[in-house]
Image: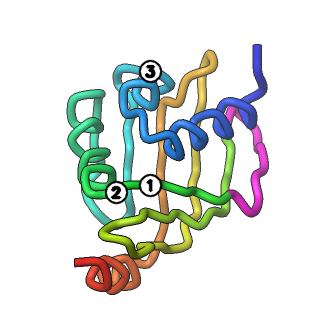
Amino acid sequence: MPSNIDTVRDFIALWNVGDPDAILAMMAPDCIYHNMPWDPLVGHAAIRQGLATFMRNASEIDWRVYHIAQGGNGVVMTERLDRFLIKGKWWEFPVMGIFELQDGRITHWRDYFDSVQVQAARATVA
């Protein structure tokens, strides 16, 4: 069985491929995905809608992991730069991600980022 770090790396690689079905398959059916400070999304149907928000206009996705560490109880932490190519321009912002895993699947995923910075970056590709 892969380590939790390997699982999170594989999960991020699927973002770079842009495969929402494969991304969801790595999550528990009742997974909680929470982009701070917005409301959490619970379960595959809600998460699929949330993924579409980020993926629908991107012709390319490139998440870069700068640091990754594993803590106790199946927790993996990532420091990333999430990048989305939209209309020929990169929309990018730094992210700190926390992934909780159980039995090889993500059960809780929290991403922390500056929402003002994200909105400003989004405006450059609108």
Instruction: Say which mark, if any, is on residue 50.
Output: none
SS majority, magenta: strand
- Left or right: where 90 falls relative to 123: right
Amino acid type, callout 3: Ala
How far apart marks 3 and 2 lie (CA) works out to: 21 Å
Cβ atoms under marks 2 and 1 closer than 8 Å? yes
Pointer 3 residue: 25
How far apart marks 2 and 1 lie (CA) works out to: 5 Å
Secondary structure of the residue carrying tag 1 is strand
- The label nearer to you, 3 versus 1, is 1
Instruction: Say which mark, if any, is on residue 60.
Output: 1
Pick the quarter of the image with the N terminus.
top right
Q: Is residue 1 above or below residue 44?
A: above
Amino acid type, callout 1: Glu
Pick the quarter of the image with the C terminus.
bottom left
- The label nearer to you, 3 versus 2, is 2
Coloration mode? rainbow
Is residue 71 magenta-colored? yes
- Left or right: where 96 falls relative to 6: left
* Residue drawn at point x = 30 percent, y = 78 percent: 125
Pointer 2 residue: 58
Give the magenta-colored segment's residue range: 65-74
Secondary structure of the residue carrying tag 3 is helix
- Left or right: where 113 falls relative to 41: right
